[in-house]
Image (tube, rainbow, N blue to C red):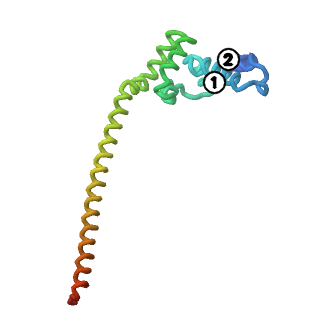
């Protein structure tokens, strides 16, 4: 176990030493270093399993891939194949299949949601029109009452109180 731990530490240090001083690195160089570390450790199931074993935590490939936006999974899978080969791609596909399948009908689901919300908008627009018609009728009735009262006043008629 000690030898394995030393090997992991030296590998991590080797990745860091390949770059210039961290304080003098540009953000692009930092991104490149981070990308290399993720590709070599997190996107390699065997390396990830060894790291998990060193840290005494359970390995769960599905958890890793569930954190990745399903729309980015094809790019991640292509990167895994490019850097680690077909067997790692297979492991990644098995672990990420649910996320991949969720993107298949995403466009149709989004289109259906748009249609649903448009129908709600139409319903609300119809309700608004009905309310405006009712308001106009009330205003017209109020106008008629005011005209009738003015007519009575001009004729000299007084309203009787009950």
Q: Position of residue 151 (x, y in %)?
A: 23, 80
58 lies above or below 157: above
Mark linked to residue 109: none
Nearest the eye: 54 or 25? 25
Q: Where is residue 53 in the image (x, y as percent from the top left)?
A: 60, 23
Nearest the eye: 32 or 115? 115
Callout 2 environment at 10 Å: few (<14), some (14 to 19), or many (20+)?
few
Q: Quadrant of the N terminus?
A: top right
**Residue extending farthest top:** 86
- The reply, left or right, for residue 144 in relation to residue 24 is left
Under tag 2, what secondary structure? helix
- The reply, left or right, for residue 85 in relation to residue 4 is left
- The reply, left or right, for residue 84 in relation to residue 100 is right
Q: At x 28% / y 48%, what residue is drawn?
A: 123
The image quarter in which residue 26 lies: top right
> Residues at badges 2 and 1 in contact (C-beta under 8 Å)?
yes
Callout 1 environment at 10 Å: few (<14), some (14 to 19), or many (20+)?
few
Q: Where is residue 49 in the image (x, y as percent from the top left)?
A: 57, 21
158 lies above or below 62: below
Nearest the eye: 68 or 114? 114
* Residue underneath mark 1: 54
Under tag 1, what secondary structure? helix
Q: At x 25% / y 62%, what residue is drawn?
A: 134
Mark linked to residue 4: 2
């Amino acid at each position: 176990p000690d030898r394995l731990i030393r090997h992991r530490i030296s590998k991590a240090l080797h990745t860091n030493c390949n770059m210039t001083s961290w304080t003098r690195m540009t953000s692009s160089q930092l991104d490149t270093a981070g990308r290399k570390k993720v590709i070599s450790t997190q996107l390699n199931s065997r390396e990830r399993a060894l790291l998990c074993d060193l840290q005494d935590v359970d390995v769960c490939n599905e958890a890793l891939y569930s954190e990745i936006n399903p729309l980015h999974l094809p790019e991640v899978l292509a990167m895994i194949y490019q850097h680690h080969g077909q067997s790692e791609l297979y492991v990644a596909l098995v672990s990420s299949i649910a996320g991949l399948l969720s993107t298949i009908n995403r466009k149709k689901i989004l289109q259906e949601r748009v249609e649903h919300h448009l129908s709600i908008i139409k319903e609300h627009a119809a309700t608004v029109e009905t309310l405006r018609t009712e308001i106009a009728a009330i205003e017209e009735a109020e106008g008629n009452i005011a005209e009738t009262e003015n007519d009575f006043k001009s004729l000299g008629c007084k309203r009787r109180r009950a």
